[in-house]
Image: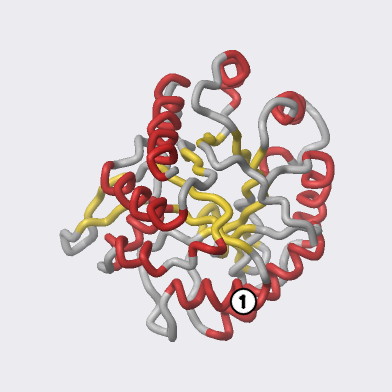
Amino acid sequence: MPLISHLPKSAGVGYKPQHLADILATPGAVKWLEIHAENYMGEGGPPLAQLKRLAESFPISCHGVGLSIGGETPLDKEHLARLKSLIGWLKPASFSEHLAWSTHETGFLNDLLPVPYTMETAKRVAEHIDEVQSALNVQMLLENPSTYVAFASSTMDEITFIEEVVSRTGCRLLLDVNNVFVSGTNQEYSPSEYISRFPVEHIGELHLGGHRVDTDDHGAPLLIDSHNDKVVNPVWALLDELLSRTGPLPTLIEWDNEIPDWATLESEANRATRALEAAA
């Protein structure tokens, strides 16, 4: 199983078609791109033509959102086959998926839902990751979730659960720093303590993104991982804490909703670049 996490230790952004001309003409601080795998599983058309053109100039991180790694049902064989075809011709620098589930019986939910942190769940998630890594012949990265509720049935915390899955599968990790802040705020634990305990030796990629601030039914803060705004200062501070432990790592700016102009997105990548340079 080859290690394909060969992204540069620099800033990248999630690719959006409206930015194609700007990316090719003036990428600025952006050194690599991420795509969502499910948007490129067709057999032709402008999306694949654009991706093939970008892959000539940039390392590509392929980020899955539909495998339902944490689901109780078996993985979708047809979905996995289409993903294998994409990985085969694209040969991305990295492949990642979420520690979450999104399938129920024959339905597919447009959400990435959390799992209970139990040994039974860890075994099931590990079996699914083993199946993915074997089918794709890659070492995948597993992303920590953003959570809004916790399971009473959990018998371990999130980091212990992630470490258990890594030990069973040999996968690497994608640490979403904004997810740490969102989950810590919603679940009332310290994001900084989470960062200090995270097994950084397994990290292959970082994510940063914006979130929406709301309140729950009791008036307490509720953060929604919306990817529709700039990265907030507390998340940048968490990034600095992490990089003080690791040095520079491939760092992505996620912005998937209310997409800004290229100059705004590139300026966020430039800020990430400054943080990486300071860590170096």
Residue sticking out furthest to the left: 219
* Residue linked to disc 1: 167
**Vertical comparison of 280 with 23: above or below:** below
> Percent position (x, y) of residue 23?
58, 21
Q: How is the image coloured?
A: secondary structure
Identify the residue at image location x=65%, y=69%.
105
> Percent position (x, y) of residue 278?
38, 40
In the rendered structure, the answer to whether residue 157 lies left or right of residue 215 reads right
> Percent position (x, y) of residue 57?
70, 26
**Vertical comparison of 148 with 26: above or below:** below
Identify the residue at image location x=55%, y=85%.
119
In the rendered structure, the answer to whether residue 57 lies left or right of residue 185 reads right
**Vertical comparison of 127 with 3: above or below:** below
In which quadrant of the rendered view does residue 46 lie?
Answer: top right
Identify the residue at image location x=46%, y=55%.
246
**Vertical comparison of 280 with 24: above or below:** below
Q: Where's the N terminus, which quadrant? A: bottom right
Identify the residue at image location x=44%, y=72%.
158
In which quadrant of the rendered view does residue 125 lie?
Answer: bottom right
Instruction: Indicate the secondary structure of the residue bearing disc 1.
Output: helix
> Percent position (x, y) of residue 222?
27, 56
* Frontmost residue, 55 versus 183: 55
Q: Where's the C terminus, which quadrant? A: top left
In which quadrant of the rendered view does residue 233 lie?
Answer: top left
Number of other residues with Cα within 10 Å of mark 1, as a class: few under 14, some 14 to 19, many 20 or more = few
Q: What amino acid does circle 1 point to?
A: Ser
In the rendered structure, the answer to whether residue 125 lies left or right of residue 49 reads left
In the rendered structure, the answer to whether residue 150 lies left or right of residue 97 reads left
Count up the numbered dots. Answer: 1
* Frontmost residue, 97 versus 192: 192
* Frontmost residue, 14 versus 233: 233
